[in-house]
Each structure stands twice: as structure tokens, then as C-alpha cells.
Image (cartoon, rainbow, N blue to C red):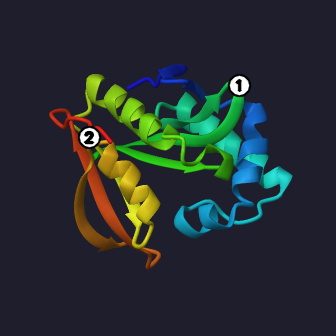
Amino acid sequence: MELPGVLDLPGARLRALREDDWALDHSLSRVADVAQWTYYPADVGVDEARERVARSLTQRAEGRGGRFVVERSGVPLGTIGLSLRVDGPHLYYAFLPAGRGLGLATEAVRALSRWALEHGADVVHARTMVGNVASEGVLERASFDRGPLDVEPDGVSVTRWSRRADSQPTLK
């Protein structure tokens, strides 16, 4: 499954991550609740941010998934990606405070999961750390079904989510 370079959203777009997007990773790592609710490490330095972006670009080049920048009027507000795994694509995302409350996370999740389902995936997976109510709402509005609670190998409690091709978006 080769990921697209751009996906349009209402009033925004997803574009493939570029080398110069390290500054977005750097900024996201400095948002306390991004580090709390995602696997983003807190307070990464410039070199580590550049390395994280380089790893994402390698993942895309090798066909193992990739990330997108969520932009509105050319301003990066967050990131969303798919990791292509044996059991299907796994979606993940994080937004700067300026990108929240605008419906962009829900639209980005809908668009990228819809794209994956239209391009051969039977199901798209996501997970939220237990207690991440905002992200749970995004997935619910994007027609993901709540699955079981699980404990990751690192001991983090998560809720598993899935969206199948026959799921219809919730209008909210």
C-alpha cells in the first residue's frame, strides 16, 4: 500500500512529512499532554527531532507506512500517520494546542482511515491510552469502534479501536 502525498480535508490538508518538518516534531514534544497521551518523547532536542523525521521518511520509503503533516492555510498544526503492520494499518496522531477544537483531528482520522480502507485494508486500527478522553472522542466521531482494554509490553494501559469499511462517519 503506497501512501499518497496529499489528502485534502475541509479547510485543510494532509501532506507527506518532509525533512524540514523536524520543527513540528520538536514543538509537539514540548506540549505536556502530547508526551502524556502519546508515544512522543518529551522535550526532544533538535538532533533527535531530525532523527525522528528521518526514521519516518525511511519508513515511508520502505513501504512500512508514513506520516503526514496536518496543515491549515500552510501552517502545520499536527501530524497523523499509518504504520502498516501484518494485522492491518495502525493510525496515530498528535496536535499542537493551536490545532485543537477545530475538528481537524477528526477530519484527518476520517480521511486517512477512509483512504486505507479504499486501498485494500479490511480494518484500520488505533489505540488510546486509558483516560485520553479527547482522543477517544476523535475516534468515536470518525466511526471507530471501541475494543478491549489491553496492556502494552511497556505496561501502558490502552483501549484498542478499529474501523471497518462498512463503518459510516458519525455526524457531530
Tell which circle, 1 or 2, labels the residue nearer the N-terminal end. Answer: 1
Q: Residue furthest left?
A: 166
Which quadrant does the N terminus fall into?
A: top left
The answer to which of 30 and 103 lies nearer the viewer is 103
Instruction: Name the residue tied to disc 1.
Output: 74
Label 1 sits on a secondary structure element that is loop
The percent coordinates of residue 163 (x first, y second) are 25, 43
Q: Is residue 20 left or right of residue 97?
A: right
How many numbered discs?
A: 2
Q: Name the residue: 63% across, 30% down.
A: 71
Query: In the rendered view, would you say 157 is above or below 107?
Result: below
Q: Between marks 1 and 2, how big is the CA–CA gap?
A: 28 Å
Q: Name the residue: 37% across, 69% down.
A: 158
Label 2 sits on a secondary structure element that is loop
**Location of residue 137 (image quadrant):** bottom left
Instruction: Name the residue tied to disc 2.
Output: 170
Please rate how many residues cluster around mark 2, counting C-alpha atoms within 10 Å: few if below 14, some from 14 to 19, many from 20.
few
